[in-house]
Each structure stands twice: as structure tokens, then as C-alpha cells.
Amino acid sequence: MTIWTPGSEKGRPLHFPPLPDFAAVADDPDEFQEAVDTAVAALIPRAKLDGNASKAHLGRAVLREAVIHYARNGGTDLTGLIRLLAALPDGVSIIDGASKIAADISQHLRAAMVSDRLFAGSGEPVDPATLLTPPPGKRARVSVISFVGLESDVQRQTFVNQLQMALFSWIRRHPAGDRPLGGLLVMDEAQTFAPSGAMTPCTQSTLTLASQARKYGLGLIFATQAPRGLHNRISGNAATQFIGLLSSPAQIRAANELAIAKGGRGLADIGRLRPGEFYAAVDGGAFEKARTPFCLSHHPRSPLTKEEVVARAAAGRAA
């Protein structure tokens, strides 16, 4: 097992490119458009274009046109895109005053790069294969990514977006083929990354994975304590669902409504489940009670402190 600490150089840092691999999807119009959507969605909050004001609306249009032009012409890194925006060529945008709008966007993105090294993509990017490929003689690799080095939700969401773009690009080039699974991405507190309602820097890439990852052999597990807070396209694409112990009346009510909607009965003891007990349902089936073994052998009463996480990551890095 390897512990990674993006944002913390003392532990085991992890970096990915801030833009998707446009060249890998250039020949597929649908996937190219999804890559553009993902890139634009991640850049919008950094460019201060989130909101309903007309200025933000025009800015999003110019940004999208610039990203498409940049991607079509072989652009790969964020710095190059910012240079393009700073001196937008004629014909890139149909919006009046686009060059001034683009120049303003470039300044906001430059400021974001100065303020957040992770967004800037500083450091040597890690090949996603490093996270998934077992060491010699082993059957699997477990890569635990801790956010102890990322202070804000935007930083965490930006990193998740970069991770998901890199994983999706890698799994497309290395599909599972005749194997049942090529990798498994487990995301805790998933409602903070792809919530219902508001968009985050990683919502679009999360939805892309939820709809397409399975055909390449990448499995996804989204864990949440607020199922109604998770984007409905994620739960709608889930082939298997587990419900564990719930205590909030609103959560219990939502779980019972879900169970009845799937053709079963209410989950009478959902508030009294013991560790390892769940209600599980496969696609098209009703919920059944199940007991599962713990996947890890050590379960302390409290999580590791930030210092302990960093120390363990650093020890693994030095080994």
C-alpha cells in the first residue's frame, strides 16, 4: 500500500497535468467535446466566471472557444493556453470584445497559478500506471490519496479533476480487455466533489467517468453520508448500491424511499446495523441484507493525525 499526499512535499507529493490529453481524443468528436467540457468546467471558477451575470456568461463562451482552438492546434499545457488568452488571435471567437475578455481571463488564471501550485501543475507529473500497477510478485496495488496537504474545497476538487482526467486518459489507452477489472477508484465524501445542484471543478470529469469508465474496465465506488446530496447522474449510473448504518431521520426516510422504488420493502433496521452490515442491491434488483468482511486489517478508533499521515507517506517514499 502506498500513501500519497498531494500538496505536501514532506510526504509523498502527487501531481497531474491541469488540462486533459486532447490529442488522445482528437479523432473522436464526442470524447473530444467531453474533454473540452471537463477542461472548461475546471477553469471556470479559477477564471472567476462562475455566476449568472452577463459578464460571466460572455467569459465562459470566450473561454470555451479558446480551449477548442488551443486543443485543435495541439496545445497541451495550461501556460500555453494562458498565453493564447492573453493575445487572442483573430477569428478564435465570435463574441464582440473577445480579446479584452480573454486577456482578463488570462490574468485571473495567472493569479490562480501563483496562489495554487497544484492548479499550476508544478512538479513532475505522475504516470497513473504508478497508482494502479502492482509491484513485482504482487496481485494488486492500493494507492491511498490523503488530502492533508490541501486546505480548501477548491484545491481538493481541482486535484480530483486532474486525477480523474489522467486516469480516464490512461484507462482508454490501457483497457482491461478480457479482464473483469483494470482498476478501482474509491471516492469518499463523494457529494463534495459532484454534488446535486452546484457545479464544482471536478463535476464534469466525475460525470464522464460515471458514464464511460466501465466500458474500459475502470470500476468506481462513490461513498457518501448524504446520498441525496450526490449528483443524480452518478447514482443513476450505479450498477450496485450499498446502504449502511444511518441515524438521521431524513437519511433513513430517503433510504426507505429508495428501497421501495426498487421494488422492495422498507429497511426497518437501517438505524441499527452493526459494523460490516449493509443493505445491497444490484441493477434491477431489490435490497437484500448482507454482511461483508473488513477490507483492511487495522481499524483504530480515530483517524491518523496530519503529522502521522505525512510521516507514513514519507517513510514509504524513502523505502
Image (spheres, grey):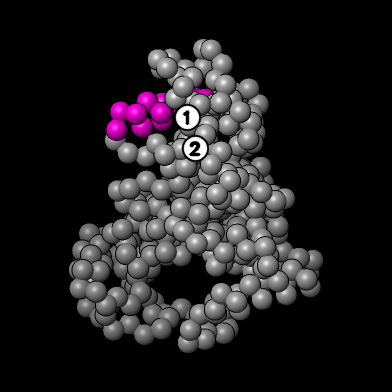
Q: Amino acid at mark 2?
A: His
61 part of magenta stretch: yes
Percent across and percent down for residue 32 are 54, 31
Decide: is 59 above or below 176. Answer: above
Q: Is residue 288 visible?
A: yes
According to the picture, the residue beneath numbered tag 2 turns out to be 108
- Counting every numbered tag in the picture gives 2
Principal SS element in the magenta part?
Answer: helix
Q: Is mark 2 in CB contact (under 8 Å) with mark 1?
A: yes
According to the picture, the residue beneath numbered tag 1 turns out to be 104
230 or 291: nearer the eye? 230
Q: Is residue 62 left or right of residue 259?
A: right
285 part of magenta stretch: no
Distance from disc 2 to disc 1, alpha carbons, whole Å, reads 6 Å
Q: Secondary structure at mark 1?
A: helix
Residue shown at 42%/39% (left/top)? 48
Quadrant location, the C terminus = bottom right
Percent across and percent down for residue 161 are 52, 48
109 or 61: nearer the eye? 109
Magenta residues? Answer: 53-66
